[in-house]
Amino acid sequence: MRPSEDASAFPVDERESKGTRSWLSEGQKGLWWLQKTSASSSVYNIALCSRLDGRVESGLLEQALSLMVKRHPVLTGVICEENG
């Protein structure tokens, strides 16, 4: 962020798991702006479809997804707007 920019003009990334806050990166600001100006667009969504053949152990799948979220905290980020 440039010194002349008002920090409160941009949303912040709040990590729910740790209760910490950090300013958005330039890329995150761009995605936030796209969402604000084109709310009905899915321009930054990535659709993914997978087919699983055979028996799926739902407990193991849940554990694997939970571990992935735990290892990659960016997946728990929440963008909150303040003063906006």
Image: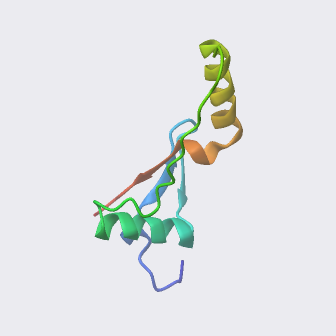
Judge whether residue 66 can be spotted in this image.
yes
Question: With 46 as the anchor, is 63 left or right in this view?
Answer: right
Front residue (pair 11, 7): 11
Q: Quadrant of residue 57?
A: top right
Question: With 63 as the anchor, is 83 left or right in this view?
Answer: left
Q: Count the marks: how many?
A: 0
Judge whether residue 10 can be spotted in this image.
no
Question: Going 37% across and 71% down the picture, which residue do you hit?
Answer: 9
Question: Going 68% across and 35% down the picture, which residue do you hit?
Answer: 68
Front residue (pair 60, 29): 60
Looking at the rendering, in which quadrant would you find the C terminus? Answer: bottom left
Looking at the rendering, in which quadrant would you find the N terminus? Answer: bottom right
In the depicted structure, whether residue 42 falls above or below residue 1? above
In the rendered image, residue 65, in percent from the top left (x then y), is placed at 63, 29
In the depicted structure, whether residue 13 falls above or below residue 60? below
In the rendered image, residue 21, in percent from the top left (x then y), is placed at 53, 52
Question: Going 53% across and 63% down the picture, which residue do you hit?
Answer: 23
In the depicted structure, whether residue 74 falls above or below residue 32? above
Front residue (pair 74, 47): 47
Specify the color scheme: rainbow
In the rendered image, residue 4, in percent from the top left (x then y), is placed at 46, 86
Q: Quadrant of residue 27?
A: bottom right
**Of all residues shown, which one is farthest toward the front?**
53
In the rendered image, residue 62, in percent from the top left (x then y), is placed at 61, 21
